[in-house]
């Protein structure tokens, strides 16, 4: 596409390239910041904390239309599986087999 055609809807390729060059020249820092501000917990939450969080999720599901007659089953499934995190922590890597690409 020609620049005249791109400028009609307001696309100025030259200006975009200038802005990109300015942004890269400005900071000189690593664009990937390892500290993203996510909360990291040093101590694991208690079972009571996790049960309260799961209960809040169950109540939210009910408020958003989850069938009430399946409430107890949902709660049992949610509590049965230890997959929940309230905060990110220093958990060890998951122990799963690597996926094979076919």
Image (tube, rainbow, N blue to C red):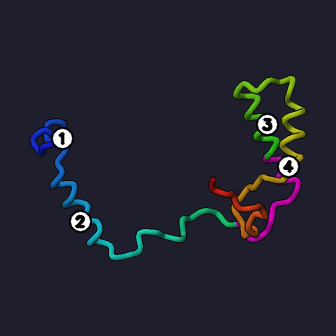
Provide the secondary structure element on which disc 1 rests.
loop
Task: Measure how far apart labels 3 and 4 are at the Cα level.
Answer: 14 Å
- Which numbered disc flags the more N-terminal residue, 3 or 1? 1
Q: Residue at x 75, y 67 (%)?
A: 91
Which is closer to the viewer, label 3 or label 2? 2
Task: Measure how far apart labels 2 and 1 are at the Cα level.
Answer: 20 Å
**Label 2 neighbour load within 10 Å: few <14, some 14-19, many 20+:** few
Q: Quadrant of the N terminus?
A: top left
Task: Measure how far apart labels 4 and 1 are at the Cα level.
Answer: 52 Å
- Which numbered disc flags the more N-terminal residue, 3 or 2? 2
Task: Measure how far apart labels 3 and 1 are at the Cα level.
Answer: 48 Å
**The disc label shown at residue 21, or none:** 2
Task: Measure how far apart labels 3 and 2 are at the Cα level.
Answer: 49 Å
In the picture of the structure, the residue carrying the numbered disc 1 is: 10
Which is closer to the viewer, label 3 or label 1? 1
**The disc label shown at residue 52, or none:** none
- Which numbered disc flags the more N-terminal residue, 2 or 1? 1
In the picture of the structure, the residue carrying the numbered disc 3 is: 58
Depth check: give the residue in front, 58 or 2: 2
| Labels 4 and 2 touching (C-beta < 8 A) | no
């Amino acid at each position: 596409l020609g620049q005249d055609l791109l400028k009609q809807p307001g696309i100025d390729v030259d200006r975009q390239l200038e802005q990109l060059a300015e942004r890269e020249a400005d900071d000189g820092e690593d664009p990937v910041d390892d500290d993203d501000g996510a909360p990291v917990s040093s101590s694991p939450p208690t079972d009571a904390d996790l049960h309260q969080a799961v209960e809040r999720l169950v109540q939210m599901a009910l408020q958003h239309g989850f069938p009430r007659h399946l409430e107890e089953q949902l709660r049992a499934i949610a509590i049965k599986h230890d997959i929940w995190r309230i905060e990110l922590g220093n958990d060890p890597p998951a122990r799963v087999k690597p996926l094979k690409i076919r």
